[in-house]
Amino acid sequence: MTGDQGEAVLAGTRCLLEARPLPCLIVIFGGSGDLTARKLFPALSRLFQNGGLPERFAILGAGRTRMTDDTFRDKMREALLAENALNPGVWEELTGRVFYEPVRYGEPGDYRKLGARIQAIEEAMQTGGRRIFHLAVPPAVYEQAAENLGLAGLAGSDAADAWTRIVVEKPFGRDLVSARRLDTVLHRHFQESQIFRIDHYLAKETIQNILLFRFANAVFEPVWNRNFVDYVSIVSAESLGVEHRAGYYDQAGVLRDMFQNHMMQLLALAAMEPPAHFTAHNVRDEKAKVFSSLRPFDTAGEFRDLVLGQYAAGSLAGSMDGRAMPGYREEPGVAASSVTPTFAMIRAYLDNWRWQGVPFYLSSGKRLAAKLTRIVVAFKEVPHAVFGNVLGEHITANRLVMETFPSQAIDMTFQVKGQGARLCLRPAKLTFSFPQGPDEPQLDSYEKVLLDCMLGDQMLFLRQDAVELSWGFLTPILDMCEACGELESHVKTYPAGTWGPRAAQNLHPGYLKDLAS
């Protein structure tokens, strides 16, 4: 191994983990559910394999399905097999730390039994009274579970030697009123420092890198403002339909499902001011300032700054056989007359010094032409066409594309001279790709957030004031749509496998260009 290779390995190890978490017990409500099988348990298994879990730990599944410890272990083994994450040697070590306790979420007596089981496991596994309750359950159960945990004396406290933390998956309510009600129940028994509101999307490497890209490089920040930026486009497109989530999705729609969490967080990362220090408190302060700067949506103008769409039958983009895709109303579990939007584009403005007058286009949808997540910063054209008399052509403005999927890269587009005797321009790109090298570690998003929760780092978790501010912006939009007697006429259909309704291009003329960058 060369000196450079040795340094790379050491750097990679430091990036993976500074110190192992303290011993703890991880209790997963919804232990028998899909999220546990597909995401949580495989993530915990990989952390264990890579030395990311504490030296002493235990995993306790809790759910309405009646199972024994052995039945639950068999189910988790099958889940690892399905995710291609089963390492036989690792499993032999892990299985003895995995347990299960049946819990009916609305039965206080079951929580007392759970408390006794927790105490027994903690004594046997010597986890030191440190507990994480992960609510991998439907949102309707959050309040019930939090309340019963508190009434059973399981909420604990937040101290250095023994702590209790509760993890809540998004969505955090379905509007401002319900978000505040959930927060009231949580704070009845848990302190804010104990509450971890998880949006695993924020733990993706490229999402985290947006902050480092902006604030660790002096060349970009001076032009990251209204003087140089024409617009910012934030796109989160999915090629899949509603799949098995039709029951939830038909009640939520794209605005509740994507905008209150993913889209607003991407907006905050793109627009926030530099924090005084890179700490959870300071970063979350700056995010909250972005949301408080959002110009209230002009409901009097109705759909002037909003486009809604719903996918109709079409073909799967890029498929070899061009197989047909059903329309949203033809999906199992969706009402035949549903007007639930599966696509939305919002033109938003931030009323602050940095961004005054710069439009932010937020767009997300299902059954679009491809799965794609990116932030496009379109800079203004050069102030004076120096080469106009020579080139006689329009000079395309610079563009910065920060992409999470599929390329996981940052591209900067600029103009250079084409080869040859004639003076002409051609676009060129500077590209940085994120995928790790052979000696660099990589954590998937759930591994990262689970690790941060064990370490008590709330940097990537949402704070209640930010939740309320983002709902405060979106709730008037939702109310306007629900009060609209002619909503169906405003929900434009688009064929599955396309980039959404044509009205999106009318609202944002650069939309298709942003997708093709």
Image (spheres, helix red, strand yellow):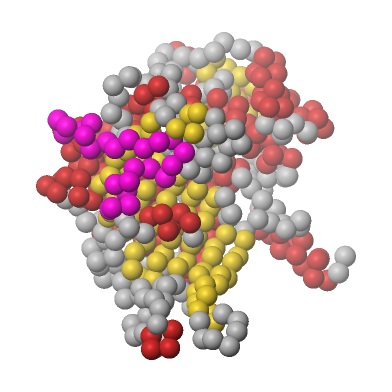
Judge whether 149 appears above or below 285 on screen.
above
Q: Position of residue 150 (x, y in %)?
A: 40, 27
Which residue is at the front of the view, 234 or 473? 234
Quadrant for the N terminus, please: bottom right
* Residue placed furthest toward the top: 66
Residue 61 painted magenta: no
Q: Which residues are magenta?
A: 484-507
The reply, left or right, for residue 77 in relation to residue 247 is right
* Residue placed furthest toward the right: 1
Q: Position of residue 420 (x, y in %)?
A: 60, 84
Judge whether 280 appears above or below 113 on screen.
below
x 56%, y 80%: residue? 418
Question: Is residue 255 among the parts visible in the rendering?
Answer: no
x 54%, y 86%: residue? 422
* Residue placed furthest toward the left: 300
Which residue is at the front of the view, 493 or 210? 493
